[in-house]
């Protein structure tokens, strides 16, 4: 018998952690990369820096939360 609630929970967690965090990290890298249009390179502005570092911060918090979760026994 299939437990649909458990299957849905695993699917959602897999999508968020398996695809969401790497995509958020990639967005952070993209935001912190200077924009080049021809020979002119536009430096990263303050708003882009803030957004990029915020993306990295969320990724770091997710990793730390995962380590803490596992250190305290994981799923009981």
Image (tube, helix red, strand yellow):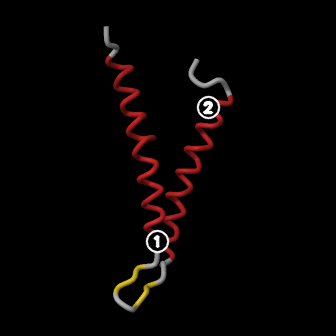
Identify the residue position indicated by label 2 in the image: 69
Whether residue 41 is situated above or below residue 10 in the rendered picture: below
Q: State the separation of the CA atoms marked 1 and 2.
A: 32 Å
User: On the image, which quarter does residue 10 sit in?
Assistant: top left
User: On the image, which quarter does residue 9 sit in?
Assistant: top left
Q: In the orientation shown, which residue stands out farthest toward the right?
A: 71
Q: Is residue 23 rendered to the left or right of residue 69?
A: left
Q: Nearer the viewer, residue 47 or 24?
A: 24
Considering only order in the chain, which callout, 2 or 1, is on the residue closer to the N terminus? Answer: 1
Residue 48 marker = 1
Q: Is residue 53 rendered to the left or right of residue 39?
A: right
Image quarter of the N terminus: top left
Q: Is residue 40 rendered to the left or right of residue 71?
A: left
> Which residue does the image show at 36% across and 30% down from the upper left?
11
Classify mark 2: residues with Cα within 10 Å, few (<14), some (14-19) or many (20+).
few
Residue 25 marker = none
> Which residue does the image show at 35% across and 19% down from the upper left?
5
Whether residue 14 is situated above or below residue 42 in the rendered picture: above
Classify mark 1: residues with Cα within 10 Å, few (<14), some (14-19) or many (20+).
some
Does the residue at mark 1 contact the one at mark 2 (Cβ under 8 Å)?
no
SS category of the residue bearing label 1: helix
> Which residue does the image show at 47% across and 73% down from the upper left?
33
Residue 4: give x, y in percent of width and height.
31, 18
Residue 15: give x, y in percent of width and height.
38, 39
SS category of the residue bearing label 2: helix
Residue 51: give x, y in percent of width and height.
48, 65
| Tally of numbered tags | 2
Image quarter of the C terminus: top right
Whether residue 15 is situated above or below residue 26 in the rendered picture: above
Q: In the orientation shown, which residue stands out farthest toward the top?
A: 1
Q: Nearer the viewer, residue 41 or 51?
A: 41
> Which residue does the image show at 48% across and 65% down from the upper left?
29
């Amino acid at each position: 018998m299939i437990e649909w609630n458990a299957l849905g929970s695993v699917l959602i967690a897999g999508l968020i952690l398996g695809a969401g965090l790497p995509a958020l990290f990639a967005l952070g890298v993209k935001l912190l990369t200077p924009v080049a249009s021809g020979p002119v390179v536009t430096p990263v502005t303050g708003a882009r820096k803030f957004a990029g570092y915020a993306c990295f911060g969320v990724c770091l918090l997710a990793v730390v939360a995962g380590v803490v979760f596992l250190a305290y026994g994981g799923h009981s």
